[in-house]
Amino acid sequence: MTRIHRTLLTLLLLLAFAPAAPAGPYHGVQYGYNITIPDNWTQIPADVVEATMKLAQNPSSKTTLVCDSAFQPAAEKNWFTYPYMIVQVIPYSSFGLRRQINEDEFAEVTKAMTGVEIGKAMDSALSPDARSIMSNASLGQPVLDRNKRRFLLPMNMTVAGIGKVKGMLAGHFGHDSLIQIGVYTRESDWDRYTSTTQGIIDSFHFDPAADYSTAAALASPSRNIWSGVAQKALAGGILGALIGGIGYAVSRFKKSKTS
């Protein structure tokens, strides 16, 4: 057995046998956010999330994915079995900023999503194996909810061995970072889990210290943020959401290759 095969086998054993953590109200301490998870869901262990994202991402990609937590129904025997959700973080420093993204810039950020070239970006961001099992990836029309300082972005993809998968990305603007909740189900189950998905998204809130600050906006007025760095950060965040949607398929695909 080669070193690469030993590494893959270790990752797959990790995916299969890592212990679950209880769900319920969840506090993301490092980035200061809170989510209410359904009682019959459980947290996917952090090392499983890290290993799965590592398998999916192109190792030469310059996009760094911060996947802070993930959850799924506790009844499922395998990790990343649909439906599931992932929380990803994009620090504003990734946009080349030393300040928060202010309210008068939210629409600009949301509008820019429609210009992301998914096919081109996927070629550079996904590992060859991940790229081979995802097709027909597309984004819907983003909707900005100013009252809740968030956007909603529907997405669709076809995953080999799974079929059509639907997702909803909810991006929340905080003081230091954009925090995204990605929820994914098989397309055939989407309506069944609509209320669960909406409940998870609506439960999100920042800690006071991490929440959007009107005082900070007054102290650091908005300027044009759309440099090349900002565009890459936004594209990376959307790609991160798409990568999240093929977590289960990536782990199963690697298992079949190793076997």
Image: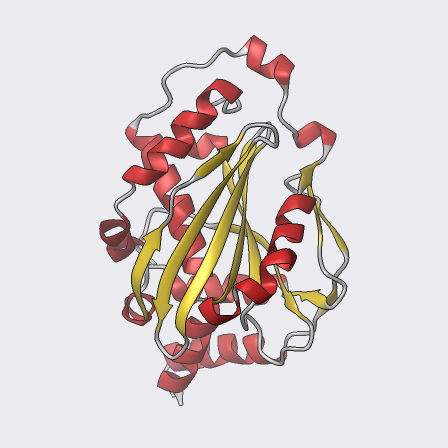
Task: From the viewer's side, name the closer residue of 234 and 46.
Answer: 234
Question: Above or below — where is 122 with respect to 52?
Answer: above
Residue 121 as seen in the image, left or right of residue 6? left
Q: In this orientation, does residue 20 appear? A: yes
Q: Residue 25's spot in the image, x, y percent? A: 77, 52
Rendered residue at 37%/77% (across/down) = 4
Rendered residue at 60%/56% (across/down) = 197
The quarter of the image holding the N terminus is bottom left
Q: Residue 106's spot in the image, x, y percent? A: 47, 26
Rendered residue at 40%/90% (across/down) = 259
Rendered residue at 42%/40% (across/down) = 142
Task: From the viewer's side, name the closer residue of 62 and 211.
Answer: 211
Q: Residue 196's spot in the image, x, y percent? A: 65, 58
Residue 197 as seen in the image, left or right of residue 97? right
User: Toward which corner of the image does residue 141 lie, by quadrant?
Assistant: top left
Q: Residue 108's spot in the image, x, y percent? A: 39, 26
Residue reaching furthest left? 120
Question: Above or below — where is 31 with respect to 259?
Answer: above
Q: In this orientation, does residue 3 appear? A: no
Task: From the viewer's side, name the closer residue of 8 and 52.
Answer: 52
